[in-house]
Structure formats: C-alpha cells, structure tokens
Amino acid sequence: MTEFVFQELNIENNRPLAPLTTIGLGGAARYYCALQSPRQLPVARRYCEQHQLPVFVLGGGSNVVFADGGFAGLVLHVAWRGIDVKQQDAQVSLRVAAGEPWDEFVAHCVARGWGGVECLSGIPGSTGATPVQNVGAYGQEVADCIVAVECFDWQTNSAVTFTREECRFAYRDSRFKSSAEKGRFIITHVQFQLSARGPLDVRYGELSRRLLDRLEAMNSNTNEQADFRVTRASESDGQAGAPHATGTEQAGRSSTVSVDTRQSQSDKERQRLRELSAHLSPVERMQTVRAEVLRLRSGKSMVIDPEDPDTRSCGSFFMNPELSADEFAALKTRINSNARSDNSPETRSDSHGDSAADVAIPVFHLPDMRVKVPAAWLMEYCGFRKGYTRNGVGISRSHALALVNRGGSTADLRALVAEIQERVCSLTGIVLQPEPLLPD
Ligand SMILES: Cc1cc2nc3c(=O)[nH]c(=O)nc-3n(C[C@H](O)[C@H](O)[C@H](O)COP(=O)(O)OP(=O)(O)OC[C@H]3O[C@@H](n4cnc5c(N)ncnc54)[C@H](O)[C@@H]3O)c2cc1C
C-alpha cells in the first residue's frame, strides 16, 4: 500500500493528548487520526503494520490517563456516528455506531420513553467504549441491554460479532478489557434491546429513595405518604433477607463493627415506586429517572462541567472490591483489630462524629453471600478525605473515589494512586484496583 492511500487517514504528528481526555493529563501522540468510518480501519491497520507502530483506540477519553511521555504509536480516534432503530411491539432494537456520544444516545432513548439505559445518564464518553468496562451506575449495567457487539479484529483484519454471552461481561470488565485480548477488538457498533414502554425499574437504594421522595411530593395522598415513610425507616435498619445484615457485632473491648445495608433497595421500596409511577407515561417515567440521576451525579461532580474543577477526572478511580463471606469476615476482623491496637486511621472519626472504635461498613449484597464494599468508604476509612491535594493532583471535594488533576502530571497521579493502594492494603488487607486504563 502506498503513502498515497494513507492520505485519507489525515494523520497528524505529535498531537497533544491531554485535551482529548477528561482528566487532562499526558503527553502527545506520535501519530493521531480520527476515523469517520469503520471502513478506514483496514487502512489504519496497514499503516501501523508498514510503520511498525502500536495502536491505541480512543473514544471520549474519559477513562484513560496517558503517560507524560505520550504515546509512541498511532492514536486512532473512533468518530463514526449513527443510530438505527427497529421497533417491534414492546421492544426496541438499536444499532449504535461506536463514536456516538453515550449520553446523547441515552437522552435520545429517554425522550422516546425507551427503558434500559436511563440510570446510565450523564456518563461521559462514547457508546463504543461502554462494553469495554461494562459501564454501570445506579443499579444498571450496559450489559443488561446489550444484544451483540460488532468489532473489527485488528489481529485477523476481519469483522466479528460477539453475542452478549461471548462478551464475558462482569463487574467493570469484559473480554475487551481483559489482558489476554486487550486492544485486539475495535468496537464498531453496539446492538441494544430496550423496552419500548420504559417501566420504572430502579434497583439502587439512594436513587430509589430520592425518586420516592420526588414522586411522593407529586402525589396528593399525604396520609399514604406518611404511613410509608414509617415503614421504610424501620426496614432500612434490618434489611430482611440480606445475608450479612447481622446488625451490630461486639468485638474486642470497646470496638464495634457493624454492617450498613442502606446501599441496597428493599422490595417494598421497589413495589412502592412502581405504584407511584403507574400513572406516568413511559416518557415521563424515564425523564423523571434521568433528571434524578443527573441531579445526584452533579452533586458528586460526576457530570462533566468545565466550570467544576472536580470533574477533571476519570470518574471513579478504583473499582469497588467484591468480597466472599470469608474475605468480608477477615475485613471486619482487621478493622476490629485496628481499633483494639489503636492502629485506627487518625482522621477517621472527625467528620462523621463516630468514635474511632465505632465503624459501620457499608455493603451491597451480591449472590452467593458475596458483598461489594465501596472503595470510597475504604479510602475514607484510611484517612483519604475529599479535597486532599498533593503535587497538583488529589481527591475530588465532592466524591472520595474520584482522583482529580489540579495542574499536576501523570507521574504525580501515579504516586498518589500508589500511596492510596499501599495504605488501604496495610490497614484493610484489600488491594484497590484502578478502573481507568493507564497506558505506558
Ligand atoms: C465524570 C465521570 C463520570 C464517570 N462515571 C462513570 C460511571 O458512572 N460508570 C462507569 O462505568 N464509568 C464512568 N466513568 C468512566 C467512563 O466515562 C466510561 O468508562 C466510558 O465508557 C469511557 O468511554 P470513553 O469513550 O471516554 O473511553 P476512552 O476513555 O476513550 O477509552 C477507555 C478504554 O476503552 C477503549 N476503547 C474506547 N473506544 C473503544 C472502541 N470503540 N473499541 C474498543 N476499545 C475502545 C480504550 O482503548 C480504552 O482502553 C466516568 C468518567 C468520568 C470522567
């Protein structure tokens, strides 16, 4: 293939990468091109082959931290767009181009009353990147409504389509992120199936309670509202049926470790939400959920806003650890022993007003007696507070799990990541895993 053929790629030299990412870090790409069609992929592949270059596929840059030295290969920006829709009875099938901005796609669905992605409102980035880490928020994951993922196989130079099962989706993971095949498949289109008459199906406790308050305020029957509030308050203490909701455990001389299950949603809450939203049209239901999700996310600087410096991040930086029953028991023992040996992080008790020996571990219950412990809680327990800043990088003032760039470098960020991982591991035994990609 001659250099003439490569002209259609419009390759740029030394393109700064920081402005193409939400965290604004990293050096330049040796070569960069924005592809307007997946048909250009074989040409780009040939270019890399001929010039012996590694390739990096870039979407919206909201989950990547480039090295200060940049990327010594071709950064290939996925820019093709388009949404095809087929509606049949209660189902809507959509084929969405990888370069379609995710939140514009969600808004498109919500405006039509199609249900399945409304809780994923406000997540930045491209649609093509959503299967990579099985994007999720507020109880929904993109895998829930993906039917198939269409890809270009960089290794074999051919198109391939994976069914949902073949994508091997897991919590913030898929075959596209796993090390064995990382970078091999470039996602060209994602096929979704949504419900044409979006039901109000919210599973996340915090969102569910906010929606209940909003819908109750809209509801004229005030007696009914009051009765329900009492029921909810008493239920949230016990969480019937939750495997680890053992109440408060006494351990050691003065330490108290308890399990806080308020993150979960009760069946009654779900049922009540359905009742309160029954008179709304699908469009109203989806719009109500989207508005509440955006409100919650904005309060945590989780919606990109150029005016809000705490949104110069990759969103949540660490994944929430999922623990077996034994691992969770070990965590509780560790925290008890910290309290007994006075090894408790000194900063833990001040803002919550808890005594150093009074710790409630928040959990989300999972199948098989497993629990998910919020990484944000582990960080705060270990003394990493919102607003902490060191060498131009730090922790968001609105969200303990978001690391932000305040004028530092990728090296500074990596040092902060290492500091957090080391202290959390030494105090809890848990190794926090980063969610974003940090290419060398
Ligand atoms: C403020 C903020 C809030 C966030 N909230 C959430 C949240 O609630 N839940 C959540 O899960 N994530 C969240 N994120 C993370 C991020 O938005 C998502 O992971 C998003 O899907 C990344 O999309 P992107 O297009 O920006 O990907 P990029 O950052 O460009 O790339 C991320 C990875 O995907 C690969 N990739 C990108 N496009 C393709 C493609 N077409 N084919 C193959 N590989 C590809 C890249 O090579 C890279 O490995 C948040 C980020 C920010 C900044």
Image (cartoon, rainbow, N blue to C red):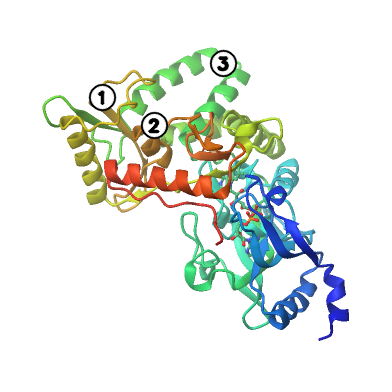
Q: Which residue is identified by label 2?
A: 262
> Between residues 148 and 439, which one lies in front from this camera angle?
439
Q: Earlier in the sequence, mark 2 or mark 3?
A: 3
Location of residue 281 with respect to 146 vertically, above or below: above
Location of residue 219 with respect to 279 vertically, above or below: above
Q: Which residue is identified by label 3?
A: 221
Q: Residue at x 71, y 35 (%)?
A: 306
> Between residues 210 and 181, which one lies in front from this camera angle?
181
| Crowd class of label 2 (few under 14; some 14 to 19; many from 20; radius 10 Å) | some
Disc 3 marks a residue whose amino acid type is Asn
Instruction: Tell me the distance, in whole angstroms, between the alpha carbons under discs 2 and 3.
Output: 26 Å
Disc 2 marks a residue whose amino acid type is Arg
Q: Which residue is identified by label 1?
A: 356
Instruction: Tell me the distance, in whole angstroms, between the alpha carbons under discs 1 and 3.
Output: 44 Å
Label 2: which secondary element: loop
Residue reaching furthest to the left:
253
> Between residues 144 and 396, which one lies in front from this camera angle?
396
Location of residue 104 with respect to 269 vertically, above or below: below
Mark 2 and ligand 1: say if the CB distance to the nearest ligand atom is below 8 Å.
Answer: no
Q: Quadrant of residue 312?
A: top right
Q: Nearer the viewer, mark 1 or mark 2?
A: 1
Q: Residue at x 43, y 36 (%)?
A: 265
Disc 1 marks a residue whose amino acid type is Ala
Residue 141, position as x, y percentages in the image: 54, 51
Residue 76, position as x, y percentages in the image: 72, 65
Instruction: Tell me the distance, in whole angstroms, between the alpha carbons under discs 1 and 2.
Output: 21 Å
Q: Residue at x 52, y 38 (%)?
A: 391
